[in-house]
């Protein structure tokens, strides 16, 4: 079996995020991300990785955590959009949430990861 493993893709997408959504733990995490890590995980790399996985055709893909930076639904949906391009289909892709995917109680209670 050929297994492809990814982690820490940190898909950044703040479309539709209102400023008051940062008035919690996301404030410090967001500042750290914007000042130090903003360009470490460009989305085009995630998209290229998915395209490359289609080319090499593993038997299964495992993504173990941190699809998002701050657990905003828009980030999780952006990561999902990239993963939807995998030709393997959902039965051959395993995705496990990381700490950034349930970064705040709102994301955990709202089941943002599971909904995406």
Image: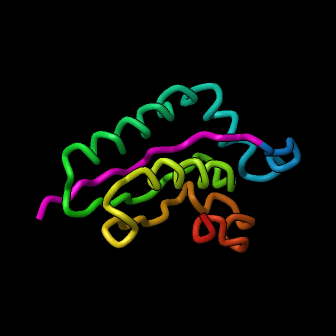
Residues drawn in magenta: 1-15
Q: In this figure, which colouring scheme has been used for the structure?
A: rainbow
Q: Is residue 23 left or right of residue 4?
A: right
Question: How far across and down, in percent of the image, does residue 49 sit?
Answer: 34, 40
Residue sitting at x 69%, y 34%: 31
Q: Quadrant of the N terminus?
A: bottom left
Q: Nearer the viewer, residue 64 or 91?
A: 91
Residue found farthest to the right: 20
Question: How far across and down, in percent of the image, does residue 115 sit?
Answer: 63, 69
Q: Does residue 10 belong to the magenta stretch?
A: yes
Residue sitting at x 49%, y 64%: 97
Question: How far across and down, in percent of the image, does residue 20 sit?
Answer: 88, 47
Q: Is residue 56 above or below residue 110?
A: above
Query: What is the quadrant of residue 87 in the picture?
Result: bottom left
Q: Does residue 91 belong to the magenta stretch?
A: no
Q: Nearer the viewer, residue 29 or 98?
A: 98
Q: Is residue 96 left or right of residue 53?
A: right
Mainly helix, strand or loop, the magenta region? Answer: loop
Q: Quadrant of the C terminus?
A: bottom right
How many circles with numbers are drawn on the protein? 0
Residue sitting at x 74%, y 41%: 15
Residue sitting at x 68%, y 39%: 30
Q: Nearer the viewer, residue 112 or 70?
A: 112
Residue found farthest to the front: 87
Q: Is residue 85 left or right of residue 3?
A: right
Q: Is residue 43 above or below residue 96?
A: above
Question: How far across and down, in percent of the image, does residue 71 sit?
Answer: 64, 55
């Amino acid at each position: 079996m050929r297994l492809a493993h990814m982690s820490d893709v940190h898909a950044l997408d703040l479309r539709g995020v209102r400023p008051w959504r940062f008035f919690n733990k996301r404030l410090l995490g967001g500042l750290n991300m914007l000042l130090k890590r903003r360009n470490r995980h460009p989305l085009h790399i995630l998209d290229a990785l998915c395209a490359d996985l289609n080319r090499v055709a593993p038997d299964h893909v495992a993504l173990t955590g941190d699809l998002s930076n701050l657990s905003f639904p828009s980030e999780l949906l952006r990561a999902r959009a990239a993963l939807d391009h995998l030709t393997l289909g959902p039965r051959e892709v395993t995705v496990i949430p990381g700490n950034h995917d349930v970064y705040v109680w709102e994301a955990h209670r709202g089941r943002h990861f599971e909904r995406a």
